[in-house]
Image: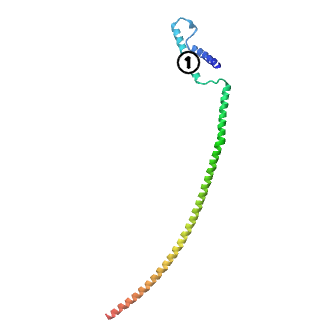
Amino acid sequence: MKSKIYIFVAVFFISISFMNNSKASAELFGSDDEKWKRIFHELEKMNSRLVTLEKAISVFPHPQSTGDVIDQINAQNKRLEDTNSIISSELIPIIQKDLASSHDKIDNLRNQLEDLLQDQKTLKEGLAQDIEQFERMNKQNFKNFESANEKALENLSIKNKKLIDVLEENLIQEAKTG
């Protein structure tokens, strides 16, 4: 009922404003056909605008009372609270469980990484010791090889000296006999 009154008041004020815009004046009831044509034309324009306005108003739903609007808002608020409680009661424990599982996995990976780093450190120290031992053995082998070479060279030198002495004697004897 109120909406019909609002529509009537709106139409009334719109029609008054359109009449002011039209060239209707005190001679509205005159006999001039031109003025009547303009008046009918203006009335047709007002009618088309009213039809457009009526269509626009019918598109929007009109709540019958503010109580209905409040009830709709309360219902929506209840749905939001229910959704919030579902999130709080179901999703948060799942997220916390996943988070705890993730922390456990991270701790496990951290421990594995620490173990790998310790193993790497142990291997590095072992490799350093092996290299030092290899170096000592190489030095010892080199010294042994050097002393063996010196002895072999000394023996060769002695043999060469004896051979040279024997050759000298043979040459001297051949030169004497010869």
Quadrant containing the C terminus is: bottom left
Say how many tags the image has.
Answer: 1
Check the image and name the residue furthest to the top: 31
Relative height, residue 153 to residue 19 (above, below): below
Quadrant containing the N terminus is: top right
Relative height, residue 24 to residue 164 (above, below): above
Q: Can residue 108 be seen in this view?
A: yes
Tell me the residue at 42%/86% (across/down).
159
Q: Position of residue 55 (x, y in %)?
A: 56, 21
Q: In front here: 84 or 17? A: 84
Q: Residue 155 sits in which quadrant? A: bottom left
Q: In front here: 116 or 172? A: 116
Q: Can residue 27 be seen in this view?
A: no
Q: Where is residue 136 in the image (x, y as percent from the top left)?
A: 54, 73
Q: Residue 58 sits in which quadrant? A: top right
Relative height, residue 6 to residue 34 (above, below): below
Q: Which amino acid type is marked by label 1?
A: Val
The kind of secondary structure element at disc 1 is helix
Check the image and name the residue furthest to the bottom: 177
- Which scheme is used to colour this image of the protein? rainbow
Q: Classify mark 1: residues with Cα within 10 Å, few (<14), some (14-19) or many (20+).
A: few
Per the image, the residue denoted by label 1 is 51
Q: Residue 87 sits in which quadrant? A: top right
Relative height, residue 134 to residue 104 (above, below): below
Tell me the residue at 61%/55% (across/down).
108
Q: Where is residue 142 in the image (x, y as percent from the top left)?
A: 50, 76
Q: In front here: 162 or 73? A: 73
Q: Where is residue 29 in the image (x, y as percent from the top left)?
A: 56, 6
Tell me the residue at 58%/62% (across/down).
119
